[in-house]
Image: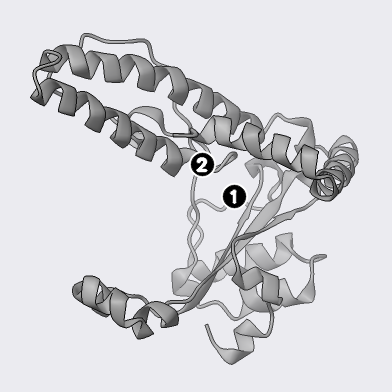
Amino acid sequence: MSAETKALLSDKMFKGMSLIMAPMGFGAIIHSLEFADSRRDPGFAARWPDFVEALDEDSIGWGIWGARQNCPRDPSGLNGEQLRELGLELARDWHPHLRALILMTEPSTIYDVKVRTSVPLTPWTSSNVTLLGDAVHTMTPGRGAGANTALRDAALLGRMLVEANQGRKPLVEAIHAYEIEMLRYSTEAVQESKKQMDANDLAHRPIVGTVQLAFMRSMMRIVNAIPALKRRAFRQMMRVRGEN
């Protein structure tokens, strides 16, 4: 992050992640990371002295995604310089500030990520070994629920282990209870996330996808303008992420 790169972003883009939805199912994300306030905060430094030294330099991160069949070249095997060129090609009709940001990015920091998803599992014979997070329910970032679901796993498993430690349940029975509930909500999260990043979806088609994108943008503007709809959308989002 520098004065030059910061000038490419609007003020709102420093308050959270920014999502860009483009035709043909392509999209992008821009995320700014600033640690200056944490470094200056004496309370933070006193509580996490080692962490202050480990804070990264302020930076701006970006990513572009899309169905592989719609990319002019397969990103697998491309080096950073080639991936930067591919990014510029995909964003050729996008805002010049985003293109400038891509062009200013050090090629060695650019890499491709293959989006993967797990398949629903059925309960197995429980033991004193169990799974949580991506080890059992890898999901696409389509709903942004992966980390939330892993944290939900940890909270639930923690409660079950406390019950076992306090003698309220045998250990394996407590772990089994965790696995049953974890498989229930994680299966929903995996399936909901996959719906948003399915290469066969209409969003990735030339004409129908453009119409679908225009409709989605219009609906998002309507939801943003009406508080009741915004609350309903938030409740739906939290249902997938896990309200607890």
Residue 204 x, y percent position in the rendering:
76, 39
Task: Please give the residue where the numbered disc 1 appears in the rendered image.
Answer: 74
- Label 1 neighbour load within 10 Å: few <14, some 14-19, many 20+: few
Which residue occupies 84% across, 47% down?
A: 217
The spot of residue 177 in percent (x, y) is 27, 14
Residue 148 in view (yes/no):
yes
In the image, is 154 to the left or to the right of 59?
left
* Mark 1 residue type: Asp
User: How many marks overall?
Assistant: 2
Quarter of image, res 42:
bottom left
Q: Position of residue 41 (x, y in %)?
A: 36, 81
Q: Amino acid at mark 2?
A: Val
Badge 1 marks a residue whose secondary structure is: loop
43 relative position to 79: left or right: left
Residue plotted at (78% across, 76% down): 96
Reply above or below: 31 against 41: above
Determine the image quadrant of residue 24. Answer: top right
Q: Residue furthest bottom?
A: 3
Q: Is residue 18 above or below residue 170?
A: below
Residue 64, by quadrant, is bottom right
Q: Residue at x 59, y 81 (%)?
A: 104
Coloring scheme used: one colour
The earlier-in-sequence mark between 2 and 1 is 1
Residue nearest the observer in this picture, 16 or 204: 16
SS under mark 2: loop
Circle on res. 150:
none
Instruction: Assess whether mark 1 and mark 2 are in contact (beta carbons under 8 angstroms).
Output: no
Q: Kindly identify which residue carries mark 2.
A: 115
Residue drawn at 49 percent across, 66 percent down: 110
Residue 43 lies, with reference to residue 131, above or below; the image says: below
